[in-house]
Amino acid sequence: MRRMVARYLTFPGERRYTPPEVFERSGVDEETAHALWRAMGFAEAPNDARAFTDADVEALRVSMRLFALTEMDRQVSLQQARVMSQALARIAASHQDVIGALLAEQDPVRSASRAVSLAEEALPALDHLLLYMYR
C-alpha cells in the first residue's frame, strides 16, 4: 500500500508513453536520454512499457535546452545531473522517514488516506521551499 501511495504522490500524471515515444516527443536521442536517466538515478524501462508522463518528456526537453544554453559538454552535463539527483534523493529519503513516522498506524487504508491528504498539501509547499532555497 505504501508503494502505491508513494508512486501516486511522487509521479503524478498518466503513464502514457513508451521510451521510444519519449525520445520522439522530446527530440532527445535514445543514447542521451538513457545516459541522463541513469545519471538521475532512474531505472531503465523496457521499450514497450508505458511508464512515462508528459512531465518526463518535458524534463528531457528542459535538460537539453539547459545544457545547450550553458554549452556544457556531455560529461559535465551528466555529472551535474548526478549531483542534483543525489542531493534530492537524500532530501526525499529524509521526508519519507518523517512522513512514515507521522503515519505509523495499524490500519493501512487509513494510513494511506492520511498520507495522500498530507502529501497533497505538503508537496506543493516543498516544491516552493526547495526552489526558494536553491535560488
Image (cartoon, rainbow, N blue to C red):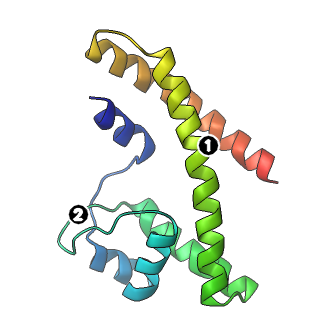
Above-or-below relation of 86 to 2: below
Q: Residues within 10 Å of mark 2 (few under 14, many from 20)?
A: some
Report the label total: 2
Q: Nearer the viewer, mark 2 or mark 1?
A: 1
Is residue 3 shown to the viewer in this render?
Answer: yes
Name the quadrant containing residue 105. Answer: top left
Q: Residue furthest top?
A: 106
Above-or-below relation of 16 to 29: above
Above-or-below relation of 60 to 103: below
- The quadrant of the image that shows the N terminus is top left
Type of the residue with mark 1 = Ile
**Residue at the spot 66% in from the left edge and 72% down from the top edge:** 80
- Which percent across, then down, holds residue 67? 65, 82
Q: Residue furthest left?
A: 48
Instruction: Please state if 100 lies on the left or on the right of 134 as rendered.
Output: left
Residue placed under numbered mark 2 in the picture: 50
Q: Residues within 10 Å of mark 1 (few under 14, many from 20)?
A: few
Label whose residue precedes the other's in the sequence (2 or 1): 2
**Residue at the spot 60% in from the left edge and 51% down from the top edge:** 88
Residue placed under numbered mark 1 in the picture: 91
Above-or-below relation of 62 to 97: below
Instruction: Please state if 79 lies on the left or on the right of 9 as rendered.
Output: right
Name the quadrant containing residue 57. Answer: bottom left
Type of the residue with mark 2 = Arg
Q: Nearer the viewer, residue 101 or 27?
A: 101
Q: Secondary structure at mark 1?
A: helix
**Residue at the spot 59% in from the left edge and 46% down from the top edge:** 90
- Which percent across, then down, holds residue 3? 31, 36
- The quadrant of the image that shows the C terminus is bottom right
